[in-house]
Amino acid sequence: MTQLTWNDLPGPTTRWLGLPTLFALRRDYLAGIVRQQRHGDLVRQRILGERIVDVFDPELLRALMVEHADALQRWERGPEVFAGLMGQSVLVTEGATWQRQRRMLMQAFTPKRVASYAALMAEAAMAGLDRVTPGEVVLDHLYSHLTMDVISRTLFSSPIGDDTAAAADAVQVLSATALAEMFWPMTLPDWLPLPGKAAKRRAQRLLHGLLAARIQGHLPSTGAHPDLLSMLKALRDEATGEALSAQEVYDQCMVSFQAGHETSATALLWWSALLAANPEVQARARAEVDTQLAGHTPTAAHVDSLPFLTATLKEAMRLYPPVAALMTRRLTREITLGGVRLPARTLVRVTPWQLHRDPRWWQEPQAFRPERFMPGAAEIPRGAYIPFGLGPRVCLGQHFAMLEMMLIAALVLQRFTLAGAEPPLPRMGVTLRPAHGLRLRLTARP
Ligand code: HEM
C-alpha cells in the first residue's frame, strides 16, 4: 500500500504563491483557519513556498505535540519577532538549552510553590479593586493593572506603582507590532525609519528600563515565601548544580512579566463579559463564593472548594482562548501523522479557537455552559481543550494563572455585580482581545 504524503492531503488551491491567502489571514486570521477546516482534519496549504498543515483533530494533535514532540521546534518567526524583548528565555530557546531552563524553572512554578504566592496575588488584586469607582468601568485597564501588579509583586515583592499605564501601553504596542511582523517572511531591523518602528523601540526601552530598575533594586526575600526573583536566583540544575546566568534571570523575568500578565488579563476580560451577559451563571458563582469564603479574603486553600467558579473560568477560556492561534511548529525531521508522511521543514499550525468550538466535541459550542467543566460532566476528549497548549512546551505558568484568576474572580464577585450586553467581537493580537475594549457596569454590593 502506498503511503499518503503532504501532496495528497486535501486543501485549497494555491494561487499567486499563496499571497492572496497570506493577505486574507492578515485581515482575519481565525476566519481563514475556519475556512481551512472545511477540507478535513489534516489540511494542507502552501504560502510563499512553505508547506503548511493544519491539525483539527484532538487525537492527531496529541500524537503530534506529545509523541512527536522531539521533532518539533517553534516556528522561527515567533522567536525572531520577540527576540529584542524576550532574549534567550524558556519561551524561545530550543534543544538542550530549553530543556535545562525548563527543568530549572519548573521548580518555581509547581502548584505548591505557586500557592505560596497567593497572599501577594490577593494583596495586589485588593489594592487594585479598592480603587475602582462603581459605574461604567473600562475593564481592559483594570485587569491589565491588576495582573501586572500581581506579576510585579510575585516577581519582585514590589507593587508596579505608577508605571502601570505606560507599561500596559508598551505591551499593547509590542503585541500589535509583533502580530503584524509575523505575517512577513523576515523582520526588518528596528532602527529603520519605518512606520511602527519608533513606537516599538520606545516600548521596548520602557519595559527594559522598568525591569532593570526592579532587578537592580531587588533585595532577596527572607520570609518563608520567597518572591519569584529570589527563587530564580536560587535555582540550581538538579543534573549539574549550575545556577541560571544573570542574563538568563533577566530574560526569564521579562518573559514572566510579558507572558504572565496579558494572557491572564485577557482571560479575565472574557470571563467578566460572559458573566455580565449571563446573570444566572454569575449569581450561582457568587453564591458559591459567598458560601465558601463567608466574606474572607480568598486563599490558595479555597480553590478546591470553588468548583463552579473554576468551571466559569475554564469555560470562558474555551470560548475565548487568550492564545487563540499561532502555536505554529516546524518539523525538524519527517514524521508520519494519521498515516500521512510529512517531510522535514513542514509547518504545523495549531488553533485552540477552532478546536474549542468544534461541534464534534462540544454540544452547542457557541453557548456559555460552565457545567461542561463540573465534576461528573461528560468527558472532554483529550486534546480538544488546550488553552495552555499541550506537550512538553505546555504553559509553564498554568498553575500560577489559574490561581491568580481564581483569586481575582472571587474578589470581584465579592465586591461587585457585573452587567453588560453580549460579549464584544474578538480581535486577534498576540492574545485574543475584545476588538474595541470591554466596558461593563459595575455595581458595588451592599
Ligand atoms: C490565562 C493565562 C495564560 C494562558 C492562556 C497561557 C497560555 C500559554 C500557551 C498556550 C503556551 C504554549 C504556547 C505554545 O505552545 O507555543 C504558553 C507558554 C508559556 N507560558 Fe503561558 N499562559 C498563561 C499564563 C502564563 C503565566 C502567568 C506565565 C508566567 C508567570 C506564563 C508563562 C509561560 C511560559 C514561560 C511559556 C513557554 C513555555 C515553554 O516554551 O517551555 N504563562 N502559555
Image (cartoon, rainbow, N blue to C red):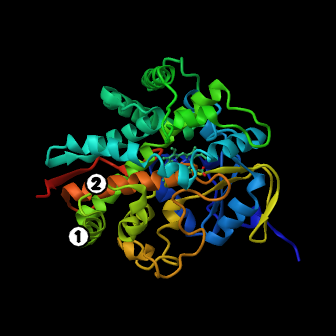
- Percent position of residue 349, x then y: 62, 55
Name the residue that disc number 1 marks.
283
Q: Is mark 1 within 8 Å of ligand 1?
A: no
| Residue at the image point whose x is 38% and y is 30% from the top | 167
> In the rendered view, would you say 415 is above or below 318?
above
Say which amino acid is labelled 2: Leu
Q: Is residue 152 above or below residue 200?
A: below
- What percent of the width, then of the height, locates residue 316? 39, 62
Which is nearer the eye, 32 or 115? 115
Name the residue located 15 percent from the left edge and 44 percent from the top edge: 133
Asked if one can make out residue 51 in the rendered structure from this viewpoint, the answer is: yes
Label 2 and label 1: CA atoms lie apart by 14 Å
Could you tell me residue 180's position as x and y percent?
A: 49, 38
Whether label 2 touches label 1, CB < 8 Å: no
Badge 2 local density, few (<14 within 10 Å), some, or many (20+)? many
Q: Which residue is mark 2?
A: 411
- Res. 435 mark: none
**141 sits to left or right of 318:** left
Quadrant of the frame with the N terminus: bottom right
